[in-house]
């Protein structure tokens, strides 16, 4: 990848203007070689399970049990155990759904768009980011599936998925909620495929190393999933093409999935939801929250596994800058909503926004503004971006802020709709709180399994971006 | 590198795909055939407390449906007769038959005969008999040829899509009003082009507009 760049002739003008030499930042520090990368990444899988891993896994499983208990209670009792009531019939379930699905978007952006744009710094973070995407989709899917109450109906007579059935019922295909089902299931499928295809060469490496070490069982397991990878030229050629095609398929998904999620609201008539800015605003917010989560996960991982040579300061810088850019877009969207509410001269919309900032839920609104608009502005400063601890803390604020954004949008608009007689105030039930709290455990369990049993970084791709992979040298351009 | 899989493993992906395809196909076919009311409900024939023979009473003797199910024209439900209705005849005919002991008990005590219900509508379905029979929908459309059944069984699936089949195209299934209780009569639409024209005229004149919206039946 990128090896063809040196084939282009050097423009004559360069000799006259003598541009300053600005070396590209290295993507793998300390001149690490092929062998070191293989040993480092495979070593994490092959080594003994660290003690901290067991502690974290136990804690994560305990937290996850809250979701499981909450869902069992919900299915056994009914959706009434959640705190929804007129007029707020959508609340934490949809807030949590949008929160989790949004987080996934950074993974797709890194794997697809940055791949097509040849942003080589994606290589050391794309695998965990894609894993994060898949696990976030799993957490997100819990909520729409379980909010139907009797979950077996989600599939069999087709409340979610269309199936021919003896009731002769079909979904309302004009409803964005149904588009959502297709958008999210497509997103999940493509993300899994992309992740898996990327894993194949590395699974082959692990298979060979386990074979050499005489561990036949593990060699067979990894070998099964490596699907006979031999690393021949023909396989690499097909592999690169498949990867590129999947990147092409995934690219529109980065934009389309959260656009359709935003349609859940924008297509309705509720003041505060019925705005045309929602699709781009939601997509920017999704990428913002996603990168927040990537850094939240990667920085501890980098510290624990001593991956400083692979996730360099340059990587952190790049991600902080994306957070800054998308966070600023989100801030712009917040102000533009207010401007349009005033400029549109619709009294209901005007009220909806004034109510958001100064009504009963003002506390949530100002948490959102502080976390989403003010927090990322710190990333203007290099000193902040260089301070890993501070970056991690700021990213936590981003995560909190983006959850509150969805809460503010969904709950404030519903709690004060057209009819003052039906106005209300929503508070979550303890079951809702536990169920949401537990999804962090579900996510962590999956992520811990991932970092224990799979190569956490694409070895083959990282090897392509170190100087040894470019024998013609990078000094020419 | 030594081999860890036999050569036959090369065919494994294809075999897996074929296996999953066949499995999915068999599952879909099985569910389509076995897991629908057309299989699960048609043919339900419980043993009744009194071996009442519809083929004798409604068939050979030609007693009108409404003699026993008297409220069908005026009410949402088609009433199951009280023992008094039976005793109109059976106080004279076969008045000592041991088969009728339950009926005589019911007549004496006022406790209804514990008939076993066959055609069960879910609680969330609103169904009105009178509106159907008064607009040319014959008993036979939903209950089959009861006049030929020694013991009644469920003849039609009564699934929602089965309801909708008729609600979407009522002209194909209605009869002349005089034929509604004649279970051997033919549908108008089956009596050639003239019959179909007459059926369509009835649909128009009677302003038959079977609801297809959710709240039509799920009120």
Image (cartoon, coloured by chain):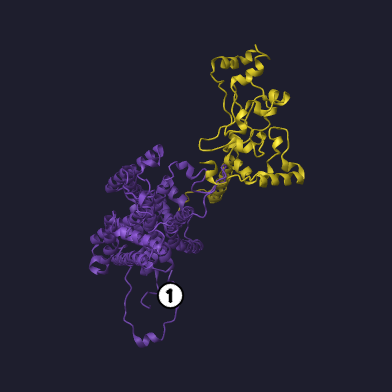
Chain colours: A purple, B yellow
Q: Which residue occupies 39% across, 37% down?
A: A77
Q: Quadrant of the C terminus of chain A?
A: bottom left
Chain for numbered disc 1 = A
The total number of labels drawn is 1
Q: Residue A144, image x and y in percent?
A: 42, 48
**Quadrant hosting residue B188:** top right
Given residues B29 and A74, the one toward you in this image is A74
**Tag 1 residue:** A5
Q: Residue A30, image x and y in percent?
A: 29, 66
Q: Residue furthest top?
A: B96
Does residue B180 appear to the left or right of A444 in the view shown? right
Can residue A351 be seen here?
yes
Does residue B4 appear to the left or right of A324 in the view shown? right
Label 1 residue SS:
helix
Can residue A127 be seen here?
no
Q: Residue A153, image x and y in percent?
A: 48, 42
Given residues A161 and A297, the one toward you in this image is A161
> Could you classify mark 1 by the number of other residues whose Cα lies within 10 Å: few (under 14), some (14-19), or many (20 or more)?
few
**Quadrant hosting residue A195:** bottom left
B134 relative to A278, above or below: above
Q: Which residue occupies 73% across, 33% down?
A: B184
A190 relative to B66, above or below: below
**Quadrant hosting residue A294:** bottom left
Q: Which residue occupies 62% across, 15% down?
A: B100
B48 relative to A310, above or below: above
Given residues B6 and A190, the one toward you in this image is A190
């Amino acid at each position: 990848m990128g090896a063809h760049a040196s084939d282009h002739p050097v423009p004559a003008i360069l000799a006259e203007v003598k541009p300053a030499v600005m070396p590209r930042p290295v993507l793998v520090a300390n001149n690490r070689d092929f062998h070191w990368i293989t040993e480092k990444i495979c070593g994490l899988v092959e080594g003994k399970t660290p003690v901290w891993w067991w502690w974290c896994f136990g804690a994560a499983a305990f937290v996850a049990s809250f979701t499981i208990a909450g869902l069992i209670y919900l299915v056994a009792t009914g959706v009434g155990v959640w705190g929804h009531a007129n007029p707020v019939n959508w609340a934490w379930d949809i807030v949590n759904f949008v929160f989790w699905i949004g987080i996934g978007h950074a993974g797709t952006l890194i794997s697809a768009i940055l791949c097509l744009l040849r942003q080589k710094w994606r290589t050391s973070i794309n695998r965990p980011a894609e894993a994060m995407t898949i696990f976030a989709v799993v957490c997100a899917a819990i909520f729409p599936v379980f909010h139907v109450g009797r979950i077996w109906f989600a599939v069999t007579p087709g409340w979610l998925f269309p199936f021919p059935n003896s009731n002769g019922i079909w979904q309302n295909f004009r409803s964005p909620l149904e588009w959502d089902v297709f958008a999210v299931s497509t997103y999940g499928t493509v993300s899994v495929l992309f992740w898996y295809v990327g894993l194949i060469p590395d699974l082959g490496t692990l298979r060979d190393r386990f074979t050499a070490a005489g561990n036949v069982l593990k060699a067979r397991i990894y070998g099964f999933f490596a699907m006979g990878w031999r690393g021949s030229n023909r396989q690499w050629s097909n592999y690169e093409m498949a990867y590129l095609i999947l990147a092409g398929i995934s690219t529109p998904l980065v934009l389309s999935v959260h656009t359709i999620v935003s349609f859940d609201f924008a297509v309705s008539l509720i003041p505060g939801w019925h705005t045309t800015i929602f699709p781009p605003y939601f997509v920017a917010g999704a990428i913002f929250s996603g990168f927040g989560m990537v850094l939240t996960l990667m920085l501890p991982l980098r510290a624990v596994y001593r991956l400083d040579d692979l996730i360099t300061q340059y990587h952190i810088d790049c991600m902080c800058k994306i957070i800054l850019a998308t966070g600023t877009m989100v801030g712009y969207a917040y102000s533009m909503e207010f401007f349009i509410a005033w400029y549109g001269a619709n009294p209901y919309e005007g009220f909806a926004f004034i109510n958001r900032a100064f009504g009963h839920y003002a506390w949530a609104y100002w948490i959102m503004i502080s976390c989403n608009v003010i927090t990322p502005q710190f990333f203007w400063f290099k000193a902040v971006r260089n301070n890993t601890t501070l970056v991690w803390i700021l990213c936590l604020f981003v995560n909190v802020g983006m959850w509150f954004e969805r809460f503010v949008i969904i709950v404030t608009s519903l709690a004060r709709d057209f009819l003052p007689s039906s106005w209300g105030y929503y508070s979550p039930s303890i079951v809702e709180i536990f169920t949401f709290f537990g999804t962090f455990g579900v996510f962590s369990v999956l992520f811990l399994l991932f970092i224990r049993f799979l190569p956490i970084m694409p070895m083959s791709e990282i090897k392509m971006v170190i100087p040894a992979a470019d024998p013609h040298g990078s000094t020419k351009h | 590198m030594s081999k860890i899989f036999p050569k036959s493993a090369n065919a494994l992906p294809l075999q897996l795909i074929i296996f999953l395809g066949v499995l999915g196909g068999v599952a879909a076919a099985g569910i389509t055939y076995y897991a629908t009311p057309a299989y699960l409900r048609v043919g339900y024939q419980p043993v009744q407390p009194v071996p009442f023979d519809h083929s004798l009473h409604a068939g050979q003797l030609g007693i009108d449906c409404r003699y026993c199910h008297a409220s069908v024209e005026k009410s949402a439900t088609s009433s199951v007769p009280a023992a008094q209705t039976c005793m109109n005849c059976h106080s004279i005919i076969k008045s000592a038959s041991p088969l009728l002991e339950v009926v005589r008990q019911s007549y004496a005590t006022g406790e209804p005969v514990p008939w076993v219900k066959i055609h069960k509508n879910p609680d969330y379905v609103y169904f009105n008999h009178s509106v159907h029979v008064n607009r040319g929908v014959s008993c036979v459309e939903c209950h089959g040829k009861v006049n030929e059944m020694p013991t009644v069984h469920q003849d039609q699936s009564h699934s929602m899509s089965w309801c909708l089949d008729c609600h979407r195209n009522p002209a194909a299934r209605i009869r002349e009003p005089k034929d509604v209780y004649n279970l051997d009569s033919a549908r108008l639409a089956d009596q050639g082009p003239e019959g179909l024209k007459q059926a369509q005229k009835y649909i128009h004149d009677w302003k038959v507009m079977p609801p297809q919206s959710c709240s039509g039946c799920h009120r």
